């Protein structure tokens, strides 16, 4: 482990995207012989850190065969165009529903600017670089690719977003889950046991689909999951149970404030926060509540927004 990346077994590493804070977003690197693939890209500002790790591993830009984005939210795909510009042999692999947004990011950018404002958007993401259409591979459900003979299986996994897939690496038994298998920050580990919770980011959160996608992931009996937020987790049956239960809890908390009018958002945030802090306590986490709250703040806000968008559609 260095400050910038962590090596796991089977040629897999997590590189810190340095998005918002260290330990929040990972870019996974998969190396097989002289070929490499990235799963998720962080933002444009993550790319120098990626190049530094490549130098240490003696990987050249031409060694990168694939840049894979689990979905097109910008903490996962914001750096994809810049990586494609730097890696001349690479193909971009994306869900069929996300491909057009990588080729022409203008709608993606406009959506984000509408939420964050122009200045905050530029500060967080910079200039999103389009990817030439001829360098894009669309990966539908059960699509397979080989990285130097190492088979990667793509699974359509809606729930967090309809443009989301997961990637199963049969050789290691690892599943790269993006945001479909929730969020698990290493700060919340207790005695090697991970704490996990679902992510309901706007605007395509669908709880039923999220449950089904967790079951689909587990049906492949993965030995480990590699989460973009953050890194490798094991003991997956326990974590899958926790995700199913907390998805239901989140939905119930949202339903409970459905008619709260102008107070709805505030009450939903408070409800999610106290629920997550209770779950952390039951997990045995002894971080001071203020510290735990600070680590969760951003996700609680996004979850509240996503649950409200879902409720207003339903
Ligand atoms: Zn994410």
Image (cartoon, helix red, strand yellow):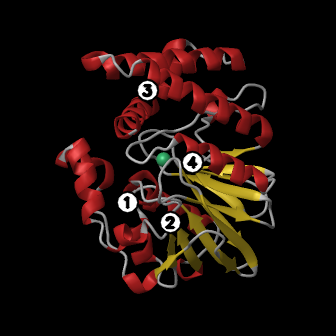
Q: Secondary structure at mark 3?
A: helix
For the residues labelled 2 and 4, the Cα–Cα distance comes to 36 Å
- Label drawn at residue 60: none
First in sequence, mark 2 or 4: give its number: 2
For the residues labelled 3 and 4, the Cα–Cα distance comes to 25 Å
For the residues labelled 1 and 2, the Cα–Cα distance comes to 12 Å
The residue carrying mark 3 is 297
Which percent across, then down, holds residue 20? 41, 40
Q: Which one is closest to the eye, mark 1 or mark 2? A: 1
First in sequence, mark 3 or 1: give its number: 1
Does residue 23 show up?
A: no
Left or right? Give the position of 216 relative to 135. Answer: right
- For image coordinates 42% across by 32% down, the residue present is 298
Residue 280's place in the image compared with 124, above or below, is above
Left or right? Give the position of 226 relative to 266. Answer: right
Left or right? Give the position of 1 relative to 24. Answer: right
Tell me the crowding category of disc 4: few under 14, some 14 to 19, or many 20 or more residues within 10 angstroms, Cα based.
Answer: some
First in sequence, mark 4 or 1: give its number: 1
First in sequence, mark 1 or 2: give its number: 1
Q: Secondary structure at mark 2?
A: helix
Asked if the residue at label 2 sits under 8 Å from ligand 1, the reply is: no
Q: Which one is closest to the eye, mark 4 or mark 1? A: 4
Which percent across, then down, holds residue 72? 43, 59
Q: Which one is closest to the eye, mark 2 or mark 3? A: 3
Kindly check if marks 3 and 4 are in contact, taking CB atoms under 8 A apart as contact.
no
The residue carrying mark 4 is 209
The residue carrying mark 2 is 51
The residue carrying mark 1 is 44
Q: Secondary structure at mark 1?
A: helix
Kindly check if marks 1 and 2 are in contact, taking CB atoms under 8 A apart as contact.
no
Q: Nearer the viewer, residue 52 or 304?
A: 304
């Amino acid at each position: 482990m260095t400050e910038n990346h962590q090596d796991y077994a089977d040629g897999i590493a997590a590189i810190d995207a340095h998005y918002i804070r260290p330990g929040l977003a990972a870019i996974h690197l998969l190396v097989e012989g002289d070929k490499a693939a990235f799963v998720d890209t962080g933002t444009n500002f993550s790319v120098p850190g990626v190049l530094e790790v490549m130098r240490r591993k003696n990987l050249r830009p031409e060694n990168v065969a694939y840049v894979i984005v689990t979905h097109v939210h910008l903490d996962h795909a914001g750096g994809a165009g810049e990586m494609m510009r730097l890696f001349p042999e690479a193909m971009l692999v994306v869900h069929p529903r996300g491909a057009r947004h990588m080729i022409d990011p203008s709608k993606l950018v406009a959506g984000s600017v509408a939420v964050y404002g122009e200045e905050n958007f530029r500060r967080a993401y910079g200039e999103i670089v389009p990817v030439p259409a001829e360098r894009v591979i669309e990966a539908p459900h059960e699509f397979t690719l080989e990285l130097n003979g190492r088979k990667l299986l793509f699974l359509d996994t809606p729930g967090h977003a309809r443009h989301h897939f997961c990637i199963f690496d049969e050789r290691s038994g690892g599943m790269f889950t993006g945001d479909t298998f929730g969020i698990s920050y290493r700060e919340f580990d207790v005695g090697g046991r991970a704490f996990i919770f679902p992510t309901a980011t706007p605007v395509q959160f669908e709880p039923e689909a999220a449950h089904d996608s967790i079951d689909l992931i587990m049906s492949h009996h993965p030995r480990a999951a590699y989460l973009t937020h953050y890194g490798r987790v094991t003991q997956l049956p326990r974590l899958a149970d926790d995700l199913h239960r907390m998805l239901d809890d989140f939905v119930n908390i949202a339903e409970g404030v459905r008619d709260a009018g102008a107070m709805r958002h505030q009450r939903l945030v408070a409800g999610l926060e106290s629920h997550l802090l209770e779950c952390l306590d039951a997990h045995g986490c002894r971080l001071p509540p203020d510290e735990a709250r600070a680590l969760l703040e951003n996700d609680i806000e996004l979850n509240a927004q996503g649950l409200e968008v879902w409720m207003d559609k339903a």
